[in-house]
Amino acid sequence: MRRDKYIFIVILFIVIIFDIMFITSKKEKYSDIENRYLSEFKIDNITEYLGDHFPYRVDFIKIKNRFSYLVGKRYINGIYIGKDNYLVPEVEKIDDDKKNLMIKRVNEFSSNNAVDVMIVPDSILINKDKLSLTIGNNEEDEINDLYKSFKNSNNINVINSLKDSNLKDDNMYYHTDHHWTSYGAYVGYKEYMKSKGYEYQDLDYFKLEELSNNFKGTSLNKVIGLGLEDRIYAPSIYNNLSVYYVLEDKITNSLYNLDYLKERNQYALFLDNNHALIEITNNDSVSDKEILILKNSYANSFIPFIVNEYKKTYVIDLRYYNKKVSDYLVDKNVDDILVLYNLNNLYSDTSLIKLK
Amino acid sequence: MAFNSLLFIFFFLPIFLLLFYVVPKKCKIYVLLLFSIIFYYFSGLFNLIILLAVTLFNYLYSFVINKYRNKFVLIINLLINLVVLGLFKYNTNLVLPLGISFYTFNNISYIVDLYNKKCSIIKNIFYYFTSSMLFTHVTMGPISKYSDLYENLKDFDYKDEDIYSGFRRFLSGLIKKVLVADNLGLLVSNLGAISDKSSLVCLLYLVSFALQLYIDFASYSDMAIGLGKMIGLKYKENFDYPYIAKSITDYWRRWHISLSTFFRDYVYIPLGGNRVGVFRHIINLLIVWCLTGIWHGRTINFMLWGLYYGIILIIEKYVLKDKLSKLPNFLQHIYTVVIFLFGYIFFSISDFNEMGHFIRSLFTNHYLDSNFVFYLKENILLLVVGIILCFKLPDKMKKLLDNKYVSILSVICYIGLFILVISYILGGSFSPFLYTNF
């Protein structure tokens, strides 16, 4: 049949064109969308090599994602695609043994120290109204259960105020990333201050400034071709800061490393991505108090609010910090200790198990 | 190397076809042999050595069989072949060489036919090795008779139309595999991972699994048959719309035909087939179906699955007889669907506790849950397409293609779908074929 002949000829043509492009193209070494090195040529991994270096690879994957969306998929590669271009990551499960160990460690630590705990819900809970259907999402119950198990600490619930603020302003979470925005982090700050009985500042006080208008977050990386770009805002009121990255022995005067604006993961501009130990001194602070924050990356956009209140802010990331926190505290004059994690990463990285 | 890999589509196949078509007829066999070795090499050097060894053994043995034609000599050969197959297949410490269940059966079929003087000996070592190692069927069949293939390999009789229509057949298999079967596979694994399944989730799981298994395997057969056609090999059809069968007897005439034929010709009939007493016939059926089950996998549930079909076929033959065919058509279809869907419980779940749990959930958990609604809504189009693919296209639809515009539209669709296939392969929905594990 003539039809079959045309199909054969056109596809043969396409194949040859792509072969020529593949052979002649310059091979990239790194894919920043996937955050990994692309494979190098070896006869054994020729399949991966071809996939990694195929001409217009990213555009093809965009076609795939857009087609999936077109045929009604709203859950692609672990991302729920909601209304208003919200890309919401699914939540991880944790096995009970790890969870119980984590609870035990928090309880032990908080029986020896006065500890505040803030477990931040994820976009999937707060943006529930944007999603038609989700599965396995019971973050609210999970956080409440955790709080019941954390017996010795002051547990700060931010779910309701995040929900309320989101209903009003619809900006608690990035559209394309799993983190909360600085607006979300401000709500966290406010709830923390209220819970401690301290006076908090209005949002206007912090003079949020736009640092980026083309932020493409981790969720977008998983479903490239869908969704829009985000803007990053951050407080811009500090003139007298010293930020000391202890293990790297590096001092700067800003909470933001704007070099990251040139990279894919712009959220990393907050506190220069993740470090084991940071000591921040604010000579213009409201009080002379000191705080220790045990945290994951959710705190990175929270800290630009809290440093306003404390002369010294010590920041420990247990994913990278391998010593005893209690030893670190011995020669410090810390007034408050805050454990700040978002639920999903608390469960997926389980670094809180290292708390001693 | 899988047919649905970039390596195959963009490099192996075009280079092979180019060489194959330009060399003189008497050299084509060497091109085919060379490329079959390259093709199989990509599944591992060790696997290639096993394949070469099995082929060489049977090639040499064929001279012995041809000379002596002695039952004892035949049995020695069968034992060796089956022990090697069994060793790899049922020893969980060893990696299963790709396609060993298929090429061992091909070789056995040749030896037995030679013994029975149903075919003549293939003396040329190149022809024998090519028949055994042909990349078109080495990994997943169809299980073929070398005597038929040998005739094809001698004259490579193909016309230009065969190239084009064979390619279209390959392409439509590729499209079904990548866009439909692999996505159904994702759905199946998502549904399988749900810990508390409702009846509806269980049902959706079985339907998705049935669709995936059929479309995955039938699309592979489409690719193999299409590729064969492009180079003058005439494979027999392996599937004939099994899910529209009206009884389980009918179903097995339509499902994986080359395997059923193998068991019929080399087990069932030698045992006496149905020309024996009732009791013996029942035993024969049970033996055949037990073996069919075992062939499908290394876990015990496959034997259960085989016996399940054995028993149902006995019931159809001796209890239901022609009562079934007197029922209204739609009831016959429903009966068949229910039987094979239920059968997939034994096929797809190897752990017996899990299997029991699944059956309990299927019959007792009557409630509408969010998992069911979610996965149904997410995959409704996929499921509809999958179900449509189980039906034969009416001839009227085929006639539509005589219209020039419809024909042009179909060319455009194929090209669009090909681009989608590439994007899905690149998008990481790459998954090896299900049946290569057997």
Image (spheres, coloured by chain):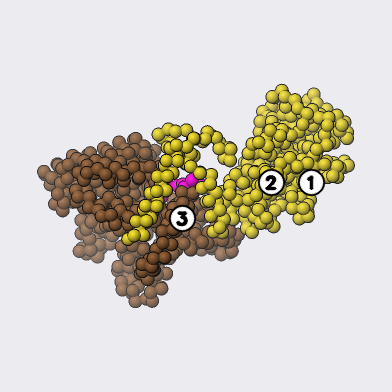
Chain colours: A yellow, B brown
Q: Is residue A235 magenta?
A: no
**Residue B398 at least partly seen:** no
Name the secondary structure under disc 1: helix
Mark 2 and 3 residues: CB-CB less than 8 Å, in contact?
A: no
* Residue at 34% in and 35% down: B45
Task: Please say if A62 is above or below B412.
Answer: above
The amino acid marked with disc number 3 is Gly
Question: Residue B416 bears which disc, if any?
Answer: 3
Inter-mark Cα distance, 2 to 1: 19 Å
* Residue B31 in the figure: left or right of residue A206: left
**Which sits in the foreground, A346 or A215?**
A215
**Dot 2: within a 10 Å radius of its alpha carbon, few (fewer than 14), some, or many (20 or more) residues?**
some
Q: Nearer the viewer, mark 2 or mark 1?
A: 2
- Residue on which disc 2 sits: A230
Residue positioned most to the left: B67
Residue B213 drawn at (x, y percent): 41, 55
How many numbered circles are shown? 3
Name the secondary structure under disc 2: strand
